[in-house]
Image (tube, rainbow, N blue to C red):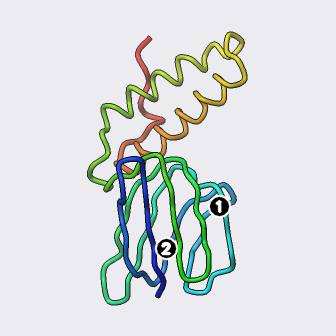
Amino acid sequence: MYKLEIVSPKGIIYSGDVYQTVVNTADGECGILENHMLLLTNVIPGKIRIEKEGEEPKELAVTYGVIDVTGDKVIILVEEAYGLDEIDVEREKQLLEEAKTKLSNKEELSLEELERYEKLRDRAETLLKLAGVNPEAYIPTP
């Protein structure tokens, strides 16, 4: 067991002792067990699964952030975190539409804007998938 904290700008989302945490990172899915090697890497939009012995796993949807694994403590700092049933599907559809519209005119965007809208698109698509909505089937209105 080790101490896990998940923190967003809204405060502490989760704090407690856990057996394992599974998180999506820039390098792929990462499972963290007790005595995991030191690690500092980027978190990408996806699902965090929190496992405690003898309990059903808890799952959260998160957006971008970082994970810091140090000895007997893991801290995950994220921009946003939701229960899977708390994802605002309509908001995510609007954000996906905005991103796709902006990305359809890539030549008019600066490199910073291009990166921002690509991240926004990826975030919205991932959260929609976690909410059970197929983002590929969603076609923005012109």
Q: Residue at x 68, y 79 (%)?
A: 37
In the rendered structure, find residue 21 and report the number of the disc placed on it. 2
Residue 95 screen position, x and y as percent = 43, 28
Is disc 1 surrounded by few (<14), some (14 to 19) or many (20+) residues within 10 Å?
few
**Position of residue 123 in the picture relative to residue 133 (left or right):** right
The answer to whether 118 is drawn above or below residue 133 in the figure is above
Residue 129 screen position, x and y as percent = 42, 47
Q: Amino acid at mark 1?
A: Gly
Disc 1 and disc 2: Cα gap in Å? 14 Å
Q: Residue at x 52, y 17 (%)?
A: 101
The answer to whether 44 is drawn above or below residue 32 in the figure is above
Q: Residue at x 35, y 60 (%)?
A: 13
Please state, as top left, top right, bottom left or bottom right, where the C terminus lies in the image: top left
Name the outermost residue toward the left: 85
Disc 2, SS:
strand
In the rendered structure, find residue 28 and report the number of the disc placed on it. 1
Q: How many marks?
A: 2
Disc number lying in front (1 or 2): 2
